[in-house]
Amino acid sequence: MIELFRNPNYNFLRWKWHFIIASWVLILVGAVSLWMKGGPRYGIDFRGGTLVYLKFAAAPELDHIRAGLNQEGLGSSTIQRYGRAQNNEVIIGSEQVGHEEEALDAGRQAILAALRTTFQVPADKLDLNNIGTDSLTDALLRFDPIGLAGQPSEAASRYRQIAEQITDFRDTERGGLLRSFAELRSVEGVPPAVVNTLEQRGSLSPFVVRNVEVVGPRVGRQLRQQALLATGLALAGMLVYIGVRFRQWVYGTAAVVATFHDVLITLGLLSLFNYEFNLNVVAGLLTLVGFSVNDTIVTFDRIRENVRLRRRERFMDLVNRSINQTLSRTVLTSGLTFLTVLGLFFLGGEVLHGFAFTLVVGIVVGTYSSIFIASPIVVGWLEPVRVGSPAGARAEQVLAGGRRPGSAGRKEP
Amino acid sequence: MSPLRWKATVILVTVLVCLVGLVCFRKMPDAKTRFYLPRSLDDLRTNVSERINLGLDLRGGMHLILQVQVDEAINSETDQVVERLRTLLREQAIGFQSIRKADPTHVQVAGIPNDQLDAARRFLQESYGGSTVAPAYTIGSLAGEESGLVLEMTPTLQAQLRQEALRNAIETIRQRVDALGVSEPAIAEHGRGEWEILVQLPGVDDPARVKSILQSTALLEIKLVEDGPYGSESEALVKTGGILPPDSMLLQELPHAHEDRAAGPQWYIVSRTSIVTGRDLRSARAEANPESPGTYQVSFSLSRDGAARFGPFTERNVGRPLGVVLDNRIQSVAVIQSRIEDAGRITGTFTLQEAADLALVLRSGSLPASIRYLEERTVGPSLGADSIRAGLTASGVGLLAVSLFMLFYYRLSGVNALLALLLNLLLLLAALAYVGATLTLPGIAGVALTIGMAVDANVLVFERIREELRLGKTVVAGVETGFDRAFVTIFDTNLTTIIAAIFLFMFGTGPIKGFAVTLTFGLLANIFAAVYVSRAIFEFVLSRQARPTTLSI
C-alpha cells in the first residue's frame, strides 16, 4: 500500500493565527491594489468594446501591427498573442468607439481597415481569406469564369457548389487561411478556369478574422450585474443547505466565510498581477467556489461524525483529529487538481491564462481556508457555547470527562 | 433475486438506456429523429456527433443581441392618429385650426370653436377613449389661451404597443432567418423588459450580410413624385419658397440608384401619403435586369386589395413620375406609361445577392421599429474546429494522467475508479443528448470540474476503506463501513455544488448557464457512478472469494 501519511497527527489549529494574519495581509494587499487601480480591470465582456481574433499566415510582428493601428488612431488598442506559437494567432482589443450603441460596429471596422492598410490588402479585389460562401457565390456569378451566363439556374447551383468547395477546403484543411492560389488547384470540383479568374480578381490577405466579439457598454453592465447576482445567490443557497444539513448555522456561515475569503484573495491577486476580469475568470471563480466548499464540507462532515461518536475530548482536539483524518484525501485531491491546473496555466495559452491563474490561486487558498479559516471559526464559536449554554448541552457530557490535550490523533478509545 | 443481482440489473439497464440514447438515434431527412442502429464506425461517429448539440463557440456561427426601438412604434401610432383625426373631424363637421403631435404620446387639437368643444370632447371620447377596462387615450383640455383638446396615450396602450412591436419584430426576424436557410436557429426574447432579442445562428459564415438583412426595416412605399430632382435639400426648399407644400415631404435618393449620374444623390419632393406599401405585396423575387445586363432587379406583385387601389390610381396619373421608397430613401423613380395592374419592379444596380436579399426582406414584411445591435459574437468555422480539438486533447490528457495515478496509487481498486469515471462521462453525455442541451466551452469546464469531483469521491471512499482496514476490520466490513461513511460526505459535497449550479442556471447568462448544466448532470451521475456502481463492483468481486483477507487498494 502506497501511503502519503501514516497516522498523521499535526496540531493544525495551533498555527491558525499565523494563517489568519497571512490571509488578512493578502486581502489587504489585494484591496490596496484594487483601490490604486480603480477596481478590477474589466474585460470587454463587462466593459463593452471590441475583440478581434486573427490568425496570420506567418509569425506576426506585433510592432508592425501596433504601428499600423497607431496610424489609424487606434493607439489605445491592446495586442496580444494567444494559442500555440505555430498558429500565429493574435487578439486585438479596442475600447468602445464613442458612447453610442450605434457605433457598436465601428471598432471592428476601424481595426480591420487599419490591418488592410498595414498589410496592403488591395481594396478592389476579393479577399479570399475573409469571404463567406454567399459572397463568393455572388462574385463567381458576376465573373462567370466557366461561361454559364446563358443558364441562370444552372449557374447559381454550380457556382454555389464551387464556392462551398473552396470555403470548406479553406476552413477545414487549411485552418482558415490560404497561402497561395496554387493550393486551390488540388481541390476536387474546382475547375482550373475558376482558379485562374480568382487569381486575377482576388487576393489572399496574410490574415483571417477568426472570431469577433463586440459588446455594447449597456450589455456589459448587465452581464456584470447578472454574474454578481448569480454568484451571490449560489453562495446563499449553499449557506442555507449547509445550515440545514448540519443543524447549526455556524457551519454554513464558516463555509461561506471561508469561500468568500478565497474569492476576495483571488480577486485581489488578479488585480495585483494585472489580469483582466472577464467571463472566463468568472467561470474560474465559480469553479473555485465549488472546489473550496467541497473541501470545507469534507472536513466538516468528519467533525460532525466525530461529534456523534461522543468521545471524551476537547472540541478543539476533535477538530484537529478530523483534519488529520482527512489529510491524505485533501492532499491527494487538491494535489491532483493543482497539477492539472498548473499544466493549463503553463500550456493553455493566453486566452485561458486568467482562468488558469484563478484556479491556481483558488486551489491553494481554497485548501488552506478549509483548515485554517473555516475550522477555527467553528471552534471559536462552538467551544465556549458547548461549555455554558443550553445549545451545547448535548456536547457537555462529552466534555465533562475532563481535558485530555494529548488525545488528538488517537484512533482507539 | 439477491440484492447484488438486483443492483446489477439496475446498472445494466441504465448503461443500456444511456448507450441507446447516445448512439442509436439519428435525424432523418424529414427532420424527425428516429431510432437508427449504427452499422459502421462512421455511422457511430455521425450519430454521436448529431446527438450532442454543440454551442456556437464550438461549431462556429453568430450570436447577436438586438434591441427593438419600441418607442418608434408609439411615435408612428401617434402620427397615424394625427392623420386619421384630421379626416374624422372634417367628416363630423367639427371646426379646428390645427392638429399636431406635441410629443410622442400627445396629440393637440387646437382652435376648436367654443360651442363645439363639448361635442368634440364627446366624439373623441367615443372614438379614442377605448373601453373602461382598457383605456386607450385620456382626453383633456388644452392648457393656455387656445380652446382645444389634448389626447394623451395611456400607459396601458403604450405598454401594449411596445409589446406588439417586440412580438412583431421577433416574428419578422424569424421569417427572415428561415428564408436564409439557417439550420437550427434560436430566436427569442432576451433579458427582462429591455426589448431585447437574442438571435443565434449556427454555421453562418457571412456575418455582415446576415446583419444587414436582419436590420433592414424594409418599409416599402410607392409615392407620387411631385417635384424634382434637385441637387440638394436647400435647392429644393428655395424652389418651393422655403415651405414644403402641405402633405408632402422631401426625400433623398439612394446613392447607387444612378451611378452614372455625376451630380451625386438627388432630392425629390414626394406626397406624404403612400399609394401602396409593403403590406400590399403578395410576392417579391430577384430577376435579371433586361435593360442592363449583369445587374439585377426585384419584381413584385400586389395583393388583390393593393391592385384595386393601384390600377385606378395609375390610370388617373399617366405621365407623372412615381417613386419607389425604401426605408425613407428613394430607390427609383419612373414615369407612369400606362395603367399598372398588380405588378411592379424596383430597379437599381443590384448584384444578384443584393436583389435576392431585398426580395427576401420584402417578402418577410417590414419591421415595426428599427433595431440596434447591442452585442455580437462571431466564431469562425475554423476556430470552432480548433477549439473542439484542443478541448478533446486537454480532457484526454487530463483523464489519462489521473487514471494512471489512480492505478498506481490504488492498484486494482484504481480499475474500479476508472470504470466509475467512464460511466460518469457516459451518463453525462447521454443526459445531454436526451435533454437536447447544448455543449459549450464553459460547459467543458463544467465537465472538468465533474471529473475532479468524481476522482475526489473515489479518493474519499478508498481512503476511508484504508482507514477502516487499518483499524483492524475485515475486508468486507471495511468496504461496507467505508462506503457508508464516505457516502454522507459525497452526498453533501455534490448536492451543495448542485444547489449552487441550479442558482447559476436560473440567474446566470449564456456561458455561465452552459457551465451549470453540465455540472449538474455530471454530479448527479457522479453520485450514482462513484457510490452505487463502484460499491456494487466491490461487492461482486468480494462475493466471488470465499473468505477475502486482502484487498488491493
Image (tube, coloured by chain):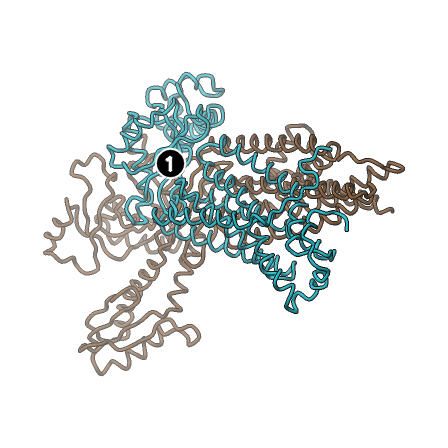
Coordinates of residue B15 in the picture (x, y in percent): 73, 40
Residue tagged 1 = A52
> In this image, B47 relative to A342: left or right?
right
Q: Nearer the viewer, residue B79 or A399?
A: A399
**Chain drawn in cyan:** A
Coordinates of residue B224 in the picture (x, y in percent): 24, 52
The image quadrant of residue A398 is bottom right
**Chain drawn in brown:** B
Q: What residue appears at the point 69 percent right and 66 percent down from the top-left corner? A: A393
Q: What residue appears at the point 20 percent right and 42 percent down from the top-left corner? A: B265
Q: Is residue A29 above or below residue B416?
A: below
Amino acid type, label 1 = Val
Coordinates of residue B484 in the picture (x, y in percent): 75, 49
Any part of residue A158 in sight: no
> In this image, B285 relative to A231: left or right?
left
Q: Nearer the viewer, residue B118 or B138?
A: B138
Coordinates of residue A41 in the picture (x, y in percent): 38, 45
Describe the element under mark 1 as helix, strand or loop. Answer: strand
